[in-house]
């Protein structure tokens, strides 16, 4: 049974998020523009300007070709629309391959947008990059488990944490990111048992997507959850609205009324 929760009225900070671990589940959705970010303001603690926009809004097959310029442009728009959530810019593939690239690009993210944090994919092999960023005052949201930017090197989207050996690797990843200074970690596409083990093993919040209800928070891609993105639906996506149907019905009514000259009636005419 769901409960009615109050709207968020104060600016969400890194401290707010840290204090929520073990106290109250954290809500996060993606946003890519000011119009929708404004609708999400006060409804969720965090907004991710995800590189998923490359698929859901640019129609590409994967996230790999997203660019830093694109992420900055969309994050500026989201920051214009939403004032209360903690906004995270998702660093695109190739923008943090070396410490120098990571610092250069994350500094751009901070200088050119009002994002309060950036997100990078990768576990212990990327911990030195997370450490370099956090030591340069850039807040980092980690991302482990199924990592869309590793699609080609992993040979597809693979659910993680299916055996003890893989759970051990995931725990090492999560602990390395925590030690490197990440303020929270997205845990994507892992078995529930693995998500629970990770959540219990670290003191920073875990934000799950396709990881069951045992993480400290949840994130969903907004166009998936409102059924605008129809190319495919992963098992973990619950639809909270019928976006595509609403648009099609509206456009069909508009077409009928324009063709029949019912629109614009006198009420819409000067
Ligand atoms: O790009 C994105 O939207 C993401 C989420 C799926 C976590 O990384």
Image (spheres, rainbow, N blue to C red):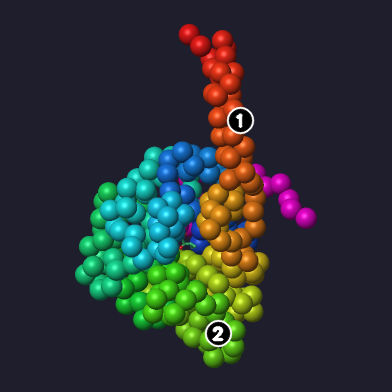
Q: Residue at x 55, y 77 (%)?
A: 159
Q: Badge 2: how crowded within 10 Å, few (<14), some, or many (20+)?
A: many
Horizontal and vertical percent position of residue 49? 42, 54
User: Is residue 11 located in the magenta-colored stretch of the structure?
Assistant: yes
Observer-nearest residue: 55 or 40? 55
In this rendering, position of residue 185 left or right of residue 241: left
- Residue beneath disc 1: 253
Q: Is residue 181 above or below residue 270?
A: below
Instruction: Kindly identify the residue that appears in the image at 46 percent across and 54 percent down.
Output: 56
* Rendered location of residue 20, percent (x, y): 57, 60
Magenta part of the chain:
1-15
Number of marks in picture: 2
**Residue 188 within the segment the image draws in magenta:** no
- Figure check: 76 above or below 174: above
Viewer-closest of 84 and 63: 63
Q: Residue furthest bottom?
A: 165
Q: Is residue 252 visible?
A: yes
* Secondary structure category for the residue under label 1: helix
Q: In the rendered image, which quarter is residue 208 located in?
A: bottom right
Whether residue 170 sits left or right of residue 79 in the image: it is right
């Amino acid at each position: 049974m769901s409960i009615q929760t109050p709207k968020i009225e104060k600016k969400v900070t890194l401290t707010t998020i840290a204090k929520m671990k073990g106290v109250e589940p954290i809500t996060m959705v993606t946003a890519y523009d000011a119009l929708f970010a404004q609708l999400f303001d006060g409804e969720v603690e965090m907004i991710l300007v995800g590189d998923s926009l490359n698929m859901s809004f640019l129609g590409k097959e994967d996230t790999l070709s997203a660019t830093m310029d694109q992420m900055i442009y969309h994050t500026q728009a989201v920051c214009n629309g939403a004032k209360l959530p903690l906004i995270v810019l998702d660093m695109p593939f190739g923008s943090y391959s070396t410490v120098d690239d990571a610092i250069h690009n994350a500094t751009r993210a901070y200088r050119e947008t009002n994002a309060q944090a950036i997100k990078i994919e990768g576990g212990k092999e990327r911990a030195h990059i997370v450490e370099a960023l956090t030591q340069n005052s850039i807040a980092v949201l980690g991302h482990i488990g199924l990592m869309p930017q590793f699609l080609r090197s992993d040979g597809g989207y693979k659910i993680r944490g299916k055996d003890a050996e893989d759970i051990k690797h995931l725990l090492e990843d999560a602990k390395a990111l925590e030690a490197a200074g990440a303020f929270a970690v997205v845990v994507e596409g892992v078995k529930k048992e693995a998500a629970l083990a990770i959540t219990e093993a670290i003191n920073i919040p875990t934000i799950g997507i396709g990881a069951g209800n045992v993480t400290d928070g949840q994130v969903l891609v907004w166009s998936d959850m409102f059924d605008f993105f129809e190319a495919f639906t992963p098992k973990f996506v619950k639809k909270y609205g019928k976006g595509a149907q609403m648009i099609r019905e509206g456009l069909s009514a508009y077409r009928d009324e324009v063709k029949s000259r019912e629109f614009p009636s006198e009420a819409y005419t000067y």
